[in-house]
Image (cartoon, rainbow, N blue to C red):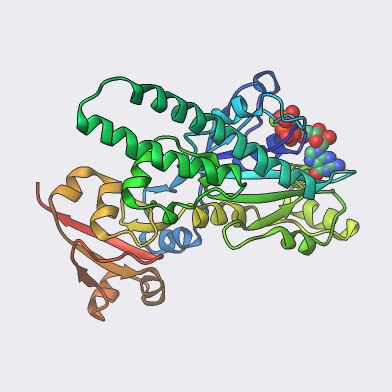
Amino acid sequence: MKIGIVGYKNSGKSLLFQWLTGEKADPAMAHTLQSAMTPIPESRIAELCGIYKPKKVTYASVEIVDTPGLSRDQVGNAARLAQLREVGCLICVVPAFETADPEKEIRTFHEDLILADLELVSNRVERIREQKKRPLAKADQEKLAFELETLEMVQNALESGKPLREDELTPEQQKATRAFRLLSEKPRLLFFNAADDETDFAPFQKFATETCPVLAASVRLENELMEMTDGEKTAFLDEMGLAASDRDAILKAVLSISGQMLFLTAGEKEVRSWLVRKNGTAVEAAAEIHTDIAKGFIRAEIMRCEDIVRLGSERAVKAENLIRREPKDYVLQEGDVVLFHFSG
Ligand SMILES: Nc1nc2c(ncn2[C@@H]2O[C@H](COP(=O)(O)OP(=O)(O)OP(=O)(O)O)[C@@H](O)[C@H]2O)c(=O)[nH]1
Ligand SMILES: [Mg+2]
């Protein structure tokens, strides 16, 4: 899964990238996309390692993409944003230090996303109108007419500033629009980059909506803290009357808005976390590991991580009859430890 860090120039995108990935974005490459993988925190892994003592530990990870800053005069932003069509989710960095005007910035950003989408959709609408003038087989005419009707609806919604949500479209209409990977439809998180001495992030929450959560931190401060030892960090924060922000919370929020969750596999060879769609089934989870496991799926044996930890071993979990055997369509729960049985 790819996550795009977006926002206007000097909002703190590259510093956020560095905080999330531990890697510095190269300033010489600031005109293009730069990405790094980062593991998704999962405290259950350490708990399982205490029991299985595995040779290898692997965290599910996401790809974080730092992007060139958008221009506040909006010129050229549609082309810059077009590079982000393949990311699954957007973290929009809003500067909230010095003289920044977050309210205006958020409004403009929303506008820029819509303008970029409109450009794409309107071009296609024009092209279909041209194509329809030519003689075509009836089936093709009908296909084009359906696409045109759908896109005109999407276009109208964009023009009114209220992009359609996926669930407002029928499955056929979704098919017609999905290829456009509209930016305004991507899951989005607003990240407020606060001043270094900010102690109260609560006011930023007024910008949160049902579909767009708000998180805040001072990324410059957080990057400085990363360079310190734990002792230095505590002393520094105490002296300044500040608190460190929760980096893990950002990655967890990203996962949640993208409709993903983690499941676990555990053994003496490896303890590992994996990504799967929220409400994903056992066979979908199997496919995340290997298509062969999904193809030859026999059953999934499910343990709860807390049972393993409480009882101290897989054998004890078995003895207490707490291993469940589940079929393909079992809906996975966060914290399930899964062992797949398959043939092939
Ligand atoms: N006071 C203050 N300044 C910050 C903070 N974060 C970023 N800045 C300022 O913003 C500058 C740019 O930070 P970057 O992370 O490079 O910003 P960016 O969004 O990647 O910038 P572009 O890639 O040019 O669009 C920093 O050098 C700081 O001067 C912050 O938390 N507090
Ligand atoms: Mg940058």
Name the residue rendered at 80%, 51% in the picture.
Answer: 232
Ligand 1 placement by image quarter:
top right
Name the residue rendered at 72%, 30% in the picture.
Answer: 74
Camera-nearest residue between 174 and 341: 174
Q: Is residue 260 visible?
A: no
**Disc count in the image?**
0
Camera-nearest residue between 81 and 337: 81
Residue 244 position in % (x across, y down): 75, 56
Residue 213 position in % (x across, y down): 62, 58
Q: Which quadrant of the figure contains the N terminus? A: top left
Residue 9 position in % (x across, y down): 75, 32
Camera-nearest residue between 294 and 155: 155
**32 to the left or right of 198:** left
Name the residue rendered at 35%, 22% in the picture.
Answer: 133
20 shown above or below 217: above
| Outermost residue to the left | 344
**62 to the left or right of 12:** left
**27 to the left or right of 289:** right
Name the residue rendered at 58%, 26% in the picture.
Answer: 33
Residue 24 position in % (x across, y down): 66, 31
Q: Is residue 234 visible?
A: yes
**181 to the left or right of 338:** right
Camera-nearest residue between 337 and 113: 113
